[in-house]
Amino acid sequence: MTDNASHLGATLQDLLDERLDAARQTEVLTHLAGCPQCRSELEALRWVRDVALKQLPVEDVPPALAARVVAALDVTDKQTVRRGWRRRTMAAAVLAAAAVVLLLLVSPSSNGDTLPNAVARDFVAYRDGTLPLTLHTSDVAAVERFFVAGGAPFAMRVFDLGMMQYQLVGGRLHRLRGRPSALFVYSGPGDRNLVCQMYEGQLADLPRSDDVREHNGITFRVYRAGTVTLVFWQEGPVVCVLASDADAEAVIQLAYAKAVKV
């Protein structure tokens, strides 16, 4: 339920915290597409959160701590929902700062938990049915509009892989080790899944790879995690990655076909 008849209010914080079910998230994103005021409020809340996150190394949050922070946000939402957006934003800032302190105190080092491993886990989670998509469609333009409406903080493009026998399935706004990610999925020959993610970053953030390739002036870093092949490349400020348990060379060729030098 919105705070009033016209705007989303506290529901924006629920969207940022990924606490909405798929149906409600779709309703909220539809509203955002046509409401400049709510988009501005969402950007303000996102700015507060991202400023706090940038004070930390990129870590996976311990589940118990995440549950405590979410519970605190729930309490704050109930107490501030009627007090106006300015106070709600201030409360979010205070909670974000508190979360930063807690994370610094209790988060263990996760240096061994690399971005390639995190992407591989996301692939397996989708394949096993534990990472649901928010939008289900084969329409490339519709998925791109979905990411824009959801406030993705960077420009992205959704690949059309139909000529290579991969059909778009849909997408979700995601977080990859604490950073915003646009995640979209394809189904290919033999019902093989192909998961693509795009996020702001640099190839230099990745660990050393024993398989580095050059194609059309673009550098590709290839990693393997069990049966999953991961191919990373840079497009401007955005890192793109394809992940699949299909034939490794086939995944690499898909990356070659769709990568654009920026």
Image: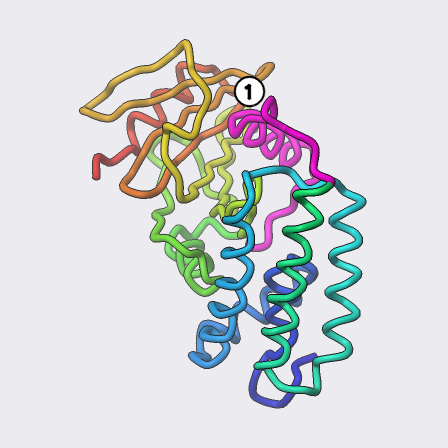
Question: Above or below — where is 251 with respect to 101?
Answer: above
Residue in view at x 68 percent, y 45 percent: 103
**Residue 249 in the image: above or below residue 94:** above
Q: The disc labelled 1 sits on which kind of residue? A: Val
From this view, report whether residue 158 is shown above or below residue 77: above
Q: Residue at x 65, y 29 (%)?
A: 109
Residue 98: image location, x then y, percent: 68, 57
- Image quadrant in which you'd find residue 40: bottom left
Residue at (65%, 72%) from the top-left corner? 91
Task: Please report the residue visible at 67 percent of the width from the left and 87 percent of the height from the top.
Answer: 83
- Between residue 234 and residue 26, name the one nearer to us: 234
Quadrant of the rendered structure where residue 64 is? top right
210 in the magenta segment: no
Judging depth in this view, the residue of 95 and 120 nearest the camera is 95
Location of the N terminus (image quadrant) = bottom right
| Circle 1: element type | strand
Indicate the quadrant containing the C terminus: top left, top right, bottom left or bottom right. Answer: top left
Residue numbers of the magenta segment? 106-135
> Pointer 1: what residue?
228
Number of residues whose C-alpha sits closer than 10 Å to that of mark 1, classed few (under 14), some (14–19) or many (20 or more): many
When the figure is inspected, residue 190 is found, relative to residue 98, above or below; the finding is above
Q: Position of residue 20 (x, y in %)?
A: 68, 62
Q: Is residue 203 left or right of residue 14?
A: left
Question: Toward which corner of the image does residue 72 lie, by quadrant?
Answer: bottom right
Q: Position of residue 219 (x, y in %)?
A: 28, 23
The answer to whether residue 114 is left or right of residue 106 is left
Q: Which residue appears farthest toward the bottom when viewing the image?
A: 5
